[in-house]
Amino acid sequence: MTALFSGHYSELLSVAGAEGIAPETCSPYRVLIGAFANHSIPRPDAVLSSNLICDNNAKIGELIRNIVRSPGFFVDCPFKKADQENAYLKRELGEMIAFLEEQSGYKLDRDRLKENIRRIGREIGLFRRIDELRKNIPSPFIPADFLKLFTADCLLAGQPQAIEYLETVCSELQEKVADGKGISYPERLRILSIGIPPVLLQGAVDKTYREYGAVSVTDPYSCSWEDGQLDAGDPLESVVRKINITPSNVFYGPFTDKLTDKLIKAATGHQVDGAIFYAHIGCRQSSAMIKVIKEVLNSIEIPILILDCDIVDITVTPEEDLCNKLRQFFELLVDR
């Protein structure tokens, strides 16, 4: 968000480099370090960090604490998701609460937390409904809006504004489906998307999709939630459960069939013609799965474009190169 709205991403990346952050480190974290190092962001009273869902996050939290000289707490999420590990994570959350109570001088309002959990349960149901509506032909969902869904959970989970937004989206999509309408241009190609395109080139990506009538109809690892319900009566247990069913959490922990099953379900359920993997070079979690994902999609005869890029740093894949690769892939799909 800092890079997207400020436009100063190159400066912040340079500052991070001067702090010793290697260019192979995930660029959103490099921007964040640059912003703290040059005082673009106010000094926080406390820093919370975790290893979810990546090791970049684990180390960057430690570095931020050193830069801003604020107290911090690290939430250690276990690698596996069995009962013993879930109990461990629940204890970690309890210790985090104790840390925040000590730092702030306030006690956790458990009734308010329970209410937030009830709203999050409602939000997850709306996320699932939106994913179902995207299966319609033509798809009624604006492809770039998946970032809004992603951000709504990241920044507004449990807040009334998130419910209002998601209910509005559902209502609009249902109206379009009832009227047999898609988005603003005719749908010709249905695309499964993995990863996040370079945020500063989103306009160019959208324009190229429009040229070929390509529509991203599913983002299984960003917007498709796993099965499971939350229980407001046990809010910390529900937080653990939410972590385990969050769409991107399949990339954290041991490899299981859940990751590939989710991919096949999304590809067949949304009737896609092809898939695009925006392989962010700084992400060791998702990029480690490229070979497996490619083999799974090939097994069900779904072509896939592996597009090496960077979420923030557009020097890695300039706009012209990015769009040319997309055009070549779309032409291949049109000729099939």
Image (spheres, rainbow, N blue to C red):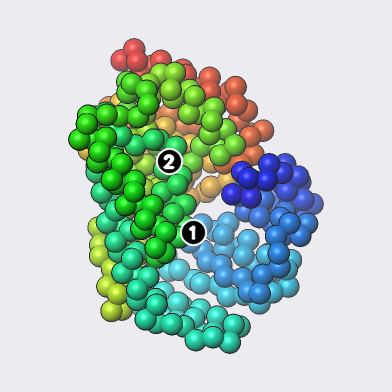
Crowding near the residue tagged with mark 2, few <14, some 14–19, many ≥20 C-alpha atoms within 10 Å? few
Give the Cα distance between marks 1 and 2: 15 Å
Give the residue drawn at x 61%, y 43%. 4
Q: Is 332 placed above or below 4 here? A: above
Report the disc number at residue 145: 2
Q: Nearer the viewer, residue 278 or 119?
A: 119
Total marks in image: 2
Q: Nearer the viewer, residue 310 or 119?
A: 119
| Res 96 seen here | yes
- The answer to which image quadrant residue 133 occupies is top left
Element carrying mark 2: helix
Residue 315: horizontal and vertical position, in percent?
67, 33
- Which three-letter amino acid code belongs to the residue tagged 1? Leu
Is 276 left or right of 300, judged from the image as shown?
right
- The answer to which image quadrant residue 5 occupies is top right
| Res 17 seen here | no
Residue hosting label 1 = 155
Give the residue drawn at x 50%, y 29%. 205
Q: Nearer the viewer, residue 4 or 189?
A: 4
Is 64 left or right of 155, judged from the image as shown?
right
